[in-house]
Amino acid sequence: MGTIAIREPLPGPRARQVLAEQADFLPAALASSLPTVVAEGHGAVVTDVDGNRLIDLSGGFGCLAVGHSHPHVVKAIQQQAERFLHTDFSVLPYASYIELADRLAKLAPGSSPKKVALFNSGAEAIENAIKIARQQTGRPALLTFEGAFHGRTMGALTLTSQPSPYKVGFGPFLPEVYRVPFPNPYRNQPPQQLTAQTLETLERMLHTAVDPRTVAAVVVEPIQGEGGFVVPPSDFLPALRTFCDAHGFLLIVDEIQTGYGRTGTFFACEQYGVEPDLLTIGKSIAAGLPLSAVVGRSTIMDGIVAGSIGGTYVGNPVACAAALAVLDVFESEKLVERAQLLGQRLWERLSTWQQKYPLIGDIRGVGAMRACELVLDRETRQPAPQQTAAILQDAARRGVILAKAGIYGNVIRFLMPLVTPLEVLDEALDVVEFAFAEAESNRGSR
């Protein structure tokens, strides 16, 4: 008997009732893409209000490395909630904040001593990394990349590249932000020259667009997430580190989506031998509870003006308890190694699909952070966003939750919990392949 069980076609009657009320009380901007309503989740499986059981390959958009409602995390949350829910660390400190900072500092890449500040969300981590970089360098300008996604608060949104739907109508944005193309081996040719071309563009910008004496930092994702799981050439991040060092810029690496084992190392920049000046963490840090972090070199973090960062809820004790439990699960269940195993199984299937289905123009990724880009024609590489949406809808109807990405909305990304059993992943991928076959068949019948 399989994991998936569709008892009522999605949306079932109870889900339809809840979703109908959504229109009365929520703005249309918050409309959900999945045609059902969750009742509970465990591991990689969710059950909706109609009793349908689905496999979740989206993992809460990367927040659920340890899966839904991991027992160890749930127990830690319950125990902390019984003790106290909140104090505000700046008024009445608690040990779990300090313990989590200690463990994150030791996990961060590089040999330099590190210190940690906790926040509520990935966007908040980015905002505070910007503030820290500007304060410590005395410079205002930031360099970033096309296709980047760093969050939806105003500073993070300025760094985010995609205008629609994220930025439309929200300007004006933060001044002194300059953007260059991200090295995309599938969309930019020739791949072997991309790093050199990107660095040449950055150097030219320092002569044509911004005075290097005013640049505080370069902000980069080691692998672009929302931008389409774009994996740059392996020499890109080391070259960017060298570029920053040469000009006295800080390097801010956004590991909000790539961190926590997703790429087969705890942080993606480990694979490139790069130590950031500031590292931002979010998503899977507390199994979906609001928490994020900025990890930085002690020489930078110790220079922050007292009281200039923080917040009422940052480093909430319940979220800290969850985060410590998440790290326990990573160690006890060897989830970094599991990411490598899951990623290899997924890569094998994606490679087979690419041979069978012309819709798949590119497959890419590292570890368990994998994706396929859909195109109407492999020669022109014209994006296929409609077919991408149809595959996601068909997969959901058959019991598998997927997420898309990419500036054209034509990338299917896989963010399954790292606790997903191989047989459950295989079952889900069988459904996804069926959806691909249907999409190809429908395209050919027109």
Image (cartoon, grey):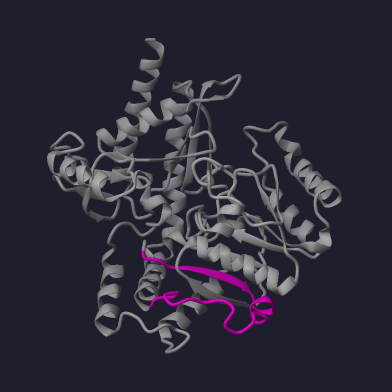
Can you say whether 281 is above or below 98 in the image?
A: above
Q: Measured along the vertical axis of the image, is residue 78 above or below residue 127?
A: below
Quarter of the figure that contains the N terminus:
top left
Q: Quadrant of residue 196?
A: top right
Question: Can you give x and y, in whole percent of width and height, for residue 372 in the image?
Answer: 49, 34
Look at the image and say whether residue 7 sits in the magenta stretch. Answer: no
Residue 13 falls left or right of residue 348: left
**Nearer the observer, 221 or 360:** 221
Residue 390 in picture, x, y percent from top left: 36, 28
Q: Say left or right for 316 vs 245.
A: left
In this view, 287 is above or below 148: below
Q: Position of residue 327 (x, y in %)?
A: 42, 69
**Residue ranking furthest to the right:** 207
Left or right: residue 290 compared with residue 37? right
What residue is at 68 percent from the left and 33 percent from the top?
A: 188
Name the spot of residue 221 as percent of width and height, x first: 60, 53
- Residue extent of the magenta highlight: 289-316
Q: Quadrant of residue 139?
A: bottom right
Residue 314: in magenta span: yes
Q: In terms of depth relative to the viewer, which is nearer, 84 or 343?
A: 84
Residue 251, placed above or below residue 397: below
Query: Residue at left 79%, top 62%?
Result: 214
